[in-house]
Amino acid sequence: MNIFLVIIQKNNRESLEINLDLVRSYLPVSHDSEQRWSSPGRIAQIYSFEYWPGQIRSSSYIHMLDNSAFTFDGFPDLPEIPVESDLPSQILKLADKNGPHFIKNISGEFSAGYIKDNSAYFTSNVGGTHPLFFTENDQLIAISNWMGILFGLPGVDDSFDFTGLSWICYERSMQD
């Protein structure tokens, strides 16, 4: 399992400081390992909080190539690539070659993000078993596959939005 957090900084004139201890405090349980990737100039950043590393098909949850990176949770699949290959690395190479919208070809049970230079693209499986959540303020846009982690970011309001909470309850699924 991987909880990923992608942050796109809106103002590239000053560095955005992320309090990782605060971010980690919103994780559901202690994680086994952590990875980071930053685009040139640190405009886009990926944080990966990994759980149960022996149970994944890939060597890592962040795959990097020059100015691009691919992160995911779950089990992304591309029928034309054999399962025994390092599939996330292959997805990254194909997205770099064919353009960012290539990640929409992924199937399986997953959520994923692809960053090229300072632009980000996201996708999730049909049916929503691996949802994506986002927040935006004057400093950043952040996307994660774990809603709670967004509250650890600067400028993010952690008060309840009762309309949003009503929709979550209506759909019969409570998220942390």
Image (cartoon, grey):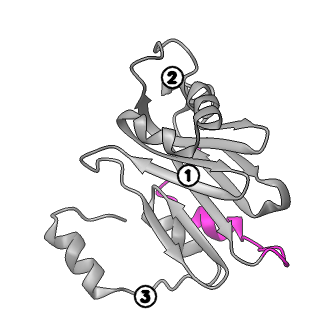
Relative to 130, 34 lies left or right: right
Determine which residue is flagged by label 3.
159
Give yes or no for residue 17 being in the magenta stretch: yes
Counting from the top left corner in percent of width and height, residue 64 is at 71, 37
Amino acid marked by disc 1 = Phe
**Which residue is at 65% across, 53% downward?**
47
Against 160, residue 8 (above or below) is above
Relative depth, front residue between 166 and 54:
166
Is disc 2 surrounded by few (<14), some (14 to 19) or many (20+) residues within 10 Å? Answer: some
Left of 21 or right of it: where is 150? left
**Residue range (magenta):** 12-31
Q: Which mark is residue 4?
A: 1
The image shows residue 136 at horizontal and vertical percentages of 54, 77
Classify residue 3 as left or right of residue 21. Answer: left
**Does residue 117 appear in the picture of this structure?**
yes
Q: Nearer the viewer, residue 84 or 68?
A: 68
Q: Which mark is residue 74?
A: none
Marks 3, 1: nearer the viewer? 1
**According to the image, label 2 marks what residue?**
57
In the picture, the quarter occupied by the C terminus is bottom left
Height in image: 114 above or below 25? above
Q: CA distance from mark 2 to mark 1?
A: 17 Å
- Residue 63 image offset from top left, x and y in percent: 66, 35
Establish if 127 lies above or below 93: below
Q: How many marks?
A: 3
Q: Label 3 amino acid?
A: Ser
